[in-house]
Amino acid sequence: MNRLPILTVALLTVTIQFVGAQVTESQEVEPLLGNTENGEQLFTEYTCAGCHGFTGETGLGTRLNPSRMRQARFIQYLRNPTDPERMPPYQEPEVSDQNLADIYAFLDSLPSQSPAIEDIPLLQAILGELRH
Amino acid sequence: MKQKPRNSKNGSVGRRRFLKGAAAGAAMLAGSSVPASITEASGSTKDTETRSESASVAHNTSEASSAIEHPGSDYMVDVFRALDIEYCASNCGSSFDGLQESMVNYGANRMPEFLTCLHEESAVAMAHGYAKIAGKPMMALFHGTVGLQHAAMAIYNAYVDRVPVYMAAGLDYDGPVSAHNATDLAALVRDYIKWDHQPGALMDFGRSAVRAYTLATTPPMAPVLLVLDAKLQKDAADNPPSVPKITVPKFPSADIGSVREIARLLVAAENPRINTGQVARTQEGLDLLVELAELLQVSVNGVSNRLNFPSRHPLQGTGTGTPDLILNLEPGSRVGTSPSSPRSTGRPPRATDAANVTTITISSAEFLVTSNFNVFGNGAGNADLVIAADAQSTLPALIEEVRRLMTSDRQTFWQDRGTKIASAHLRARRRTITDARYGWDNSPVSLPRLAAEVWPHIKDLDWSFVSPQRFLGNWPSHLWDMNKTYHFIGAHGAGGMGYGAPAAVGAALANRKHGRISINIQGDGDLNYAPGVLWTAAHHQIPLLTIVANNRAYHAEVMFLQKQCAARNRGVDRADIGTTIKDPNISYSQMAKAYGVYGEGPIDNPRDLGPALRRALERVKAGEPAVLDVLTQPRG
């Protein structure tokens, strides 16, 4: 194998990691203005609910509601997810930053549908059945 | 013994008389295989209508003189009865009309009772579910090549699940459609059945029928097939052979040398783990596994292909730390996985630890040789010791050997180990139950909420969960106290869709005589393969609560396709094409009603679930099937 592609890949990897490192939670990056309605539509069209549930709280995927990352980190994560086998990467031109900002805005607008365990008698009863 | 046909089930006497009359007429239309005396008496073979009328006349006027009083199929019914076969699930066909007539008239539709199925795949899946509760096979009867090929997928499921199904297929070389015949009919499914035979005479039939039964019910259990020539069914058998002696073989348990070696390794291990697949064939198997686990204080991954170990037992799960010994008991195609265990703390062995992990497998699947299908993946995998034996049958000797080897020092160590495992189990289970709160108030309903809502309605009853649970996120076993084998009977076997609803109906039929409430949480995609089984449940008055977990998609496939779309960076908004079941939405309550079953829904507000469950369960307790259509989140 030609060594040049290997070097290119290595450099790209370093660059991506470097760029990624630049976008931190604490850094001031002007967030994009998200459109909640469009975000809801995209959340459906991209079948995000398949893994994350219709409100981002259920399913096999990571819980997205309440949001645990800022918009810039959210967009960066969707471009380069840590485990592409579980979470596929979403790239331009198919998915723009604005699209992802809209989805972020939709998720951020959702109220939690997850009461505290203390407020759910059915689950309290099941916990009470544990014998040990 | 000649019995009069009497069956007043469903109270539909008039209808049954009508059907009986029709059947009698149809029985005389069996082409040139109809006995010569009857054909001659009819006086015509030119067209169907004329033949029908003539045959009926012949039947009515010359029955005493020319009808075959003791057809071979009467003897077949005698043999099936001797084999204790309660039911025959079938979609009717002319190649076995002789046998069917003997069942409903000579046998008075008892032992076996003919179950009317609307698809052969449903017939086999019903038998599959029935056997997992009843512990014995149901008969499934098919019509030639067409019926057998309809049944094929369900046969494959039962084979992979190692469940006995007693199958027969009619073959009529003189029948009206030559394409329904084959030179070697069983070849269609021979790669995934255990044994087949086409007896040439009644004497052969008796021996083959008994042989088929004993092979089907000896581990590794699997479907078997008899091919029954129509002529053999219909020819006179005035002096039928006696029913052969039925002797079920002793099940194959491990040799004592292997048992001693396994016991030695288990006693010496610091952190052993037991993984289970299809080990507990009966409650005795589950109880033996509990005895072994408690003796050694070892963790058991026990809720996988069926309930092998109580879901809330302190030793249930993956234990703690990395195991140094793994004992696989009857692993399925997914060796060592048990996603239905609570999210426990035990880790799978890392690649670097592999050299330090001793793996032992006891599996009767080693006896199931298949040349074409990758049924059991790697089979025993990379085990250090593989024992070809039935694990349940081996457990008593293994327990005895462990008792013989244990010392007070080891017992003290084991007690300490058990305390740690129990503590890890409790933490994991509490965490899992607590996680059920996520999306609790969601509409559509979250799958943990669905399972949690069902539990208070059944927990004080004798109940049986008769459906797969992987697509439900395994929430039933996370939340419900499962401690009887019938509390969870596992899944498809081969993962072939279309299993859920008919297997649930078959299991519910087996539960019926125990007065047990059967619960089926049913995927909508699976139900659409052969929903006609709902009619079978209504017709035969089989009590079963079916809750359709309706996510309006094949959501596993949605996820797979979405991954491809994203990886290729094109059409990420098109993964719903071919994977969703919308536009129009299907109404499962209306579907149920169309089949004569109580139906309610769609229910999308979780607060409406409790009252709906109460209403549906009232129907089930009264002996009916009932269907609730519940709109759910995509996955658990």
Image: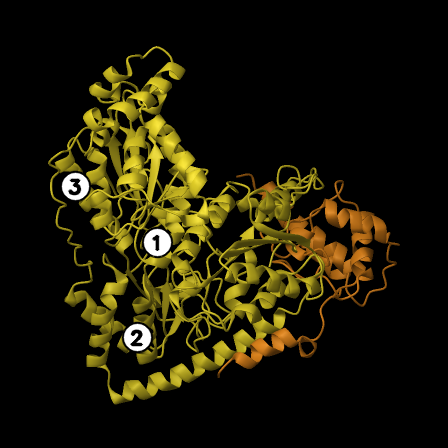
Q: How many numbered callouts?
A: 3
Kind of residue sitting beneath label 1:
Ala
Please identify which colour was used for chain B in the image: yellow
Seen in the picture, residue B49 relative to B257 is either above or below; the reply is above
Quadrant for the N terminus of chain B, please. top left
Q: Which residue is mark 2?
A: B292
Do dots 2 and 3 share one subunit?
Answer: yes
Residue that appears at 37% across and 63% down: B276
Earlier along the polypeptide chain: callout 3 or callout 1? 1
Look at the image and tell me whether residue B117 can be seen. no
Is residue B566 toward the left or the right of residue B103 in the image?
right
> Mark 3, chain letter?
B
Q: How is the image coloured?
A: by chain
Q: How far is disc 2 from disc 1 in space, using C-alphas?
A: 26 Å
Earlier along the polypeptide chain: callout 2 or callout 1? 1
- Residue B223 in picture, x, y percent from top left: 30, 45
Secondary element at image label 2:
helix
Earlier along the polypeptide chain: callout 2 or callout 3? 3
Secondary element at image label 3:
helix
- Residue A100 in picture, x, y percent from top left: 78, 51
- Residue B207 in picture, x, y percent from top left: 15, 42
The disc placed on residue B131 is 1
Q: Nearer the viewer, residue B120 or A124?
A: B120
Kind of residue sitting beneath label 2:
Leu
Find out whether the residues at labels 2 and 1 contact each other: C-beta distance under 8 Å: no
Task: For label 3, count other residues whose C-alpha is less than 10 Å away and answer few (under 14), some (14-19) or many (20+).
Answer: many
Mark nearest the camera among 2 and 1 is: 1
